[in-house]
Image: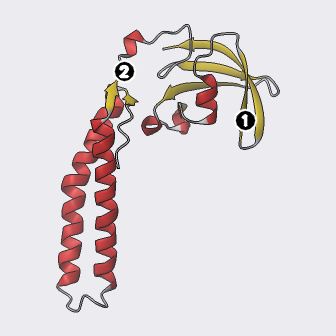
Amino acid sequence: MSDNKPVYLTKEGLDKLKAELHFSRTKERARIADAIAEARAQGDLSENAEYDAAKEEQSHLEAKIAKLEETIANARLIDETKVDTSKAFILSTVTVQNRKTKSQQNYTLVSAQEADLASGKISVSSPIGKGLLGTSVGDVIKIKVPAGEVELEVLSISR
């Protein structure tokens, strides 16, 4: 099941995953166990939709817990103070300008587990994230995106 690939995370991202794992192991498992017990108390399990739903939810939760445990086991913390800003790498904040629309955008390159487009955090495994990795200020790159191809110029890189 495990491919043992390292997952690069900030301390904040790792702490968030650990908190989610703790919540899932304690509160969610207990809630689902109560739902199963309640459904079991209703009698015949062969035609009990509540029991089937609770068992399915339990299965999904256990898969989620296993995935969180694997991610945490493979986590590698990134020292944010040692991020090189001469090139775009994970944890770099890159300001780019779309050459066609002249619009500017800031992206912080993060692992897939920490990606949050609403806050400008994009995964290094996304098309734009992959395209930005290793670039320097002044570079112009073409990236294939679902809507076609976009041409971006790297304006700045910071930590």
Q: Mark 1 points at which residue?
A: 144
Res 78 label: 2
- On screen, residue 108 versus residue 53, left or right, reads right
Q: Which amino acid does label 1 sit on?
A: Lys
Whichever of labels 2 and 1 marks the residue nearer the N terminus, that label is 2
Assign a secondary structure to mark 1: strand
Q: Which residue is drawn at 35% across and 16% down?
A: 79
Q: Residue furthest right?
A: 100
Res 159 label: none
Q: Quadrant of residue 138?
A: top right
Looking at the picture, the colour scheme in use is secondary structure
Q: Which residue lies furthest to the top in this view?
A: 86
Assign a secondary structure to mark 2: loop
Vertical arrangement, residue 68 with respect to residue 46, above or below: above
Q: What residue type is labelled 2?
A: Ile
Closest to the observer, 5 or 59: 5
Q: Where is residue 75 in the image (x, y as percent from the top left)?
A: 32, 32
Q: Position of residue 71 (x, y in %)?
A: 33, 40
